[in-house]
Amino acid sequence: MDKQSYQSMLDQILSNQINDLICRQRSRMGQILSSDDNNFVLFGAGRLGRNVLASLRNINIQPVAFADNNPQLWETERDGLRVLFPEQAANEFGSSAVFVVTIYTSAPVLQQLKDMGLKVISFPELAWRYPDILLPHGGLELPHKIFAQADEVRHTLSLWADDISCREYLAQIAWRISLDSSLLPLHLPPQETYFPSNIYRYLDNEVLVDCGAFTGDTIRAYFQQQGSFQKIIAVEPDLINCQQLEVFISSLPSSVQKKIEIKQNAVGAKREIVWFNATGSAASSVGVGDFQVNCIPLDDFLMQEQPTLIKMDIEGAEVEALVGGEKTIRQNLPVLTICVYHCQEHLWKIPALIKSFSESYSLFLRRYSDECWELVCYAVPKERLI
């Protein structure tokens, strides 16, 4: 399909009135939930479920239980709430409660609960019902920005290099203003995240800068895809994560260890001390929290490096980190694999920002989980394209 056809489709999506869309969604939710129906079972007792529990309790809504598919959690408690196995939760609360899927990869669980005949909603649907306490949450917000920034949204559509990217982009915009999951294509296998086999070529002398290195999960994935490299610079500000990262690297052959450098700092647009929420998990983030860490622009600590591949999964700080690495990116034209799901507007702002650095980049959009999660923008210089 040509770009003009995609633009026409986007114009049609954006022609909907925002208030009508929100009212339509809330009306649909009203058919599921009455105004005084606050009996919730949270299906998923992980980080998202516990955050939802805390938020609901803040407005005096007390969920009745957790449910989970993980047998290790059954008959335990999380934050004072029982964790039940699915059939037990259905028997106890199926006739009186609404089951909220508090799992990011939600599609299989939504289908599981619907097949059990339960009243079920997704986390985004709950968040739209209680936006004051649950939004924004990553790329999930009410859709006002999409309409307020419609010109930018339209511009970014013109930047994608292939049909898959255009279709995913249109589906993302449509889903974010409707929460209709039937509009979304199936996501790609999670194991392909950052390192797809059909977008860019790998180099034997790759210099990988892993921003948001966590405990080494990206490095492990890189080794599975491509064993050869010249250097890896692993950037991770969370001390607990860094310690686990060091343990992982120490388990590697000495010839590999000496080519990996760990930097315990955040990355951003300027050199400064920033507040940091150190959770010892993948959700650690700058801007809030009780800890302080050094924030250093990529341009500062990569002055003596020639990066060939830069990955960013840094919980919403991607724009600032790209700005702080503009000189390095312009000079070296590394492949960029940048998460665009931590803020709603990152979907259209980050691709446009990267393209402003260099017209040599071809841009691709790929998703590796349900709804808006694990959405990655790839920027590939022409000589690295497959």
Image: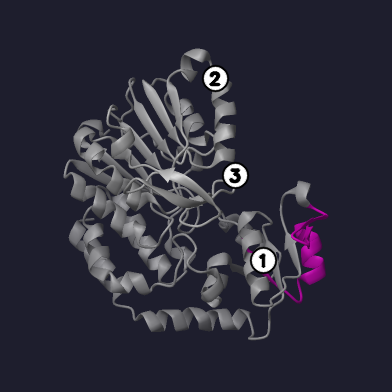
Q: Residue at x 68, y 72 (%)?
A: 57
Residue 204 coordinates in the image, percent (x, y): 34, 20
Cα distance between the residues tagged 1 and 3: 20 Å
Report helix, strand or loop for mark 3.
Answer: loop
Of tags 1 and 3, the one toward the viewer is 3
Q: How many labels does the image show?
A: 3
Of tags 3 and 2, the one toward the viewer is: 3
User: The N terminus appears in which quarter of the rendering?
Assistant: bottom left
Across and down, in percent, residue 30 comes to 58, 83
Q: In this view, does 201 lie to the left or right of 65?
A: left
Any magenta on residue 132? no
Instruction: Please give the label number shown on residue 53.
Output: 1
Q: Give the range drawn in magenta.
A: 74-102
The residue shown at (35%, 62%) is: 345
User: Which residue position is annotated with label 2?
Assistant: 252
N-terminal of the pair, mark 3 or mark 2, is: 2
Q: How far apart are marks 3 and 2 (CA)?
A: 22 Å
Q: Which residue occupies the foreground of this view, 242 or 52?
A: 242
Amino acid on which disc 2 is placed = Leu
Amino acid type, residue under disc 3 in the picture? Gly
Tag 1: amino acid: Leu
Picture quarter with the C terminus = top left
Q: Which of marks 1 and 2 is nearer the N terminus?
A: 1
Dot 1 crowding, Cα within 10 Å, few <14, some 14–19, many 20+: many
The residue carrying pointer 3 sits among few (fewer than 14), some (14 to 19) or many (20 or more) residues within 10 Å by Cα, namely some
Examine the image and state in which quarter residue 123 appears.
Answer: bottom right
Residue 353 position within the rendered picture, expressed as x and y whole percent measured from the top left: 25, 52
Identify the residue position indicated by label 3 in the image: 280
Upstream in sequence: badge 1 or badge 3: 1
Q: Which of 223 and 132 is in front in this view?
A: 132
Q: How far apart are marks 1 and 2 (CA)?
A: 40 Å
